[in-house]
Image (tube, helix red, strand yellow):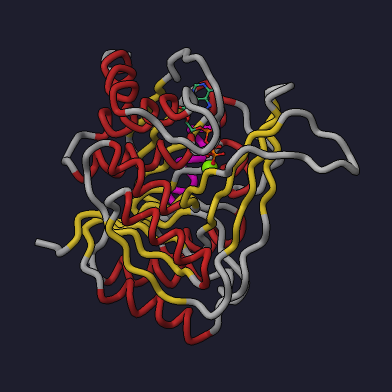
Amino acid sequence: MKKHKIVTLTVNPALDKSAHFSGLVPEQKIRCEAPLYDAGGGGINVSKAISRLEGTSLSVIASGGPSGEMIKEILNKESISFQSIETKNLTRESFVAVDDNTNSQYRFNFPGTSVTDAEKNEIIKTVEGLEAEFIVVSGSLRDGLSVDFYQQIAKIAKKSDTKMIVDTSGEGLKKVLETGVYLIKPNVGELAKLIGVERLEMEEVNDAAKQIIEKGGAEIVVVSLGPQGAVLVTKDSYDYVPAPNVAKKSTVGAGDSMVGGMVWALSQNKNLKEVIRWGVACGSAATMNEGTQLFKLEDAKRLFEWLKDK
Ligand SMILES: Nc1ncnc2c1ncn2[C@@H]1O[C@H](COP(=O)(O)OP(=O)(O)OP(=O)(O)O)[C@@H](O)[C@H]1O
Ligand SMILES: [Mg+2]
């Protein structure tokens, strides 16, 4: 038995600050309502989604300074277990401002600070020391971490028989595929980039995913298609699941919720047909909530029931 069922890794977390205001006017002071704080970043969101489904995970984060402390406080409050690698540099913040006059959302994202070599080695050592059944690597890399950083994690996962799930993009993802992982979840644009084409039509998705699987890049490729749903491809199967028609408020966190739903289902030994449906259910349920809020358990359950025989 492994010590942890699910570990998530967030190397570049963010303290998300959001506030409402009425009217965006240049030069003048814009009075905002009291801000709300949230812990964000790919792996953290996946851990939150798992917790929403009444599952547990260990969230490994690299955090530093007062913003890092606030993230830890929020995770504590939400009863999400975490292990932090302390960084000398401050954890980044992001700012979301909602104009109530027009109901428009403005999202300000800042780059992450850099990590030192010693901190990087500490992250690797930490992951090496965790016996996990599943490790989820999600989100962008940051300065100080080379493009093969996630590949290094993939090598550790391979050696320790840990199933790795990756949700990232660009060169970092390409590198990961050289080593090979259990599951990747690109959206259709990310998949196109991976195989070096400008864009992909729906009917080309299966072949593109199969190319990756045949080369040993991943055992399972889940391609998310936004409002159209998702497909799950393995070497000998193809399963398309439409997204339910929901009252969409914000798609922020849909991808992370989907990954959370899938890894939770995998950890519960559900079959792949159920895994993709839990993914779509959680992704679509996330779009029913405002801002950075993920999904409500009852919405995810209801959508899953609806998708069961689709
Ligand atoms: N407009 C929508 N209506 C219903 N469901 C949606 C919508 N947008 C996204 N989803 C659900 O969320 C899942 C993931 O969405 P998407 O394909 O947009 O991921 P992504 O591009 O990785 O998103 P993110 O920006 O969060 O990284 C979809 O497979 C679908 O189930
Ligand atoms: Mg995504």
Q: Residue at x 30, y 37 (%)?
A: 52
Is 99 in front, or is 185? 99
> In the image, is residue 198 above or below residue 123?
above
Residue 15, x across and y down, in percent: 53, 55
Q: Which residues are magenta?
A: 205-214
Whether residue 287 is in magenta: the answer is: no
Residue 180, x across and y down, in percent: 40, 59
Q: In which quadrant is the C terminus drawn?
A: top left
> In the image, is residue 26 above or below residue 171?
above
Is 77 in front, or is 112? 77
Q: In which quadrant is the N terminus drawn?
A: bottom left
Q: Residue at x 22, y 39 (%)?
A: 54
* 225 relative to 163 in the view: left or right: right
Main secondary-structure element of the magenta-colored stretch = helix
In which quarter of the view is residue 76 placed?
bottom left
Is 199 in front, or is 166? 166
* 124 relative to 200 in the view: left or right: left
In which quarter of the view is residue 6 placed?
bottom left
The residue furthest right is 27
Q: Residue at x 62, y 52 (%)?
A: 94
Whether residue 208 is in magenta: the answer is: yes
The residue furthest bottom is 118
Residue 33, x across and y down, in percent: 62, 37
Is 192 in front, or is 127? 127
Residue 39, x across and y down, in percent: 46, 52
Q: Is residue 203 visible?
A: no
> In the image, is residue 251 above or below residue 149?
above
